[in-house]
Amino acid sequence: MNTKSELFFLDLEETIIHSFSDPVLCNVQRIRSFLKKAGATEVHIFSYAIHDDFDRETFNKHIKPTVELALGVKVMSCVTVPEMVKADYEYTGVKFEKGHEVSEFIQLRGKKDGFINYVLARCGKFTRAVLIDDIVPDLTVTHRKKGWSIELWNVNSI
Ligand SMILES: [Mg+2]
C-alpha cells in the first residue's frame, strides 16, 4: 500500500452507499465532517461487497466519482475480498476451506478482525489506521510499544 502513516478506510454498503446494487449515497455529512476533522484527503475502500475484479471495476467506474465528489477526498484503492483472504492467510497462517474462502473468511473474521488482520498484513509502517463501517464496534486497538493504533468507528456514532 502507500507510505502515509495515517490511513482511512471506508466500508460501502450501509456506510456511504445504500447497497452495491442501489448505490444511493448515505451518511455523507457525518463522514465528510469526520474526514475533514481528521485531516484526511485520501481514503481506501474496505468492503465485503467487492467480491472480485469485476465488482472493483464497477465501483471504480460508477460509484467512485460520486463518492469522491460527495466526501471531498480521493479514493486511492479498493481491496477485494479474495485479496483480504490472502493477506489474512499471510498474517495468521489460517487457511480457509478451498472453494469457500470468501464466505468462511467473512463469517469467521467479521469486519473487526478482517480489518485488523488486513492492516497488519498490508499497511507497513502506519501510525493510525481508521475504518468507518456500519457494523463495527467503537473500538481502538493500540500497540503500546510500536505506537500504532487501529480505530474502528461505527458510522452511526460518528
Ligand atoms: Mg456495511
Image: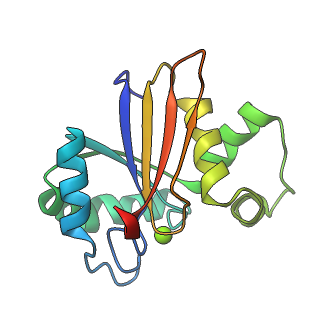
Vertical side of 148 occupied by 139: above or below: below
Comparing 65 with 157, the one in front is 157
Horizontal side of 3 relative to 109 (left or right) equals: left
| Residue 82 appears in the figure | no
Comparing 19 with 59, the one in front is 19
- Residue 97 locus on image (x, y percent): 87, 57
Vertical side of 75 occupied by 137: above or below: below
| Residue 62 appears in the figure | yes
Horizontal side of 52 relative to 128 (left or right) equals: right
Query: Which residue is rendered at x = 46% and y = 63% of the image?
Result: 54
Query: Which residue is rendered at x = 18% and y = 67% of the image?
Result: 29
Query: Which residue is rendered at x = 84% and y = 42% of the image?
Result: 94
Q: Quadrant of the N terminus?
A: top left
Vertical side of 17 occupied by 99: above or below: above
Query: Which residue is rendered at x = 37% and y = 36% of the image?
Result: 7
Q: Quadrant of the C terminus?
A: bottom left
- Residue 20 locus on image (x, y percent): 41, 76
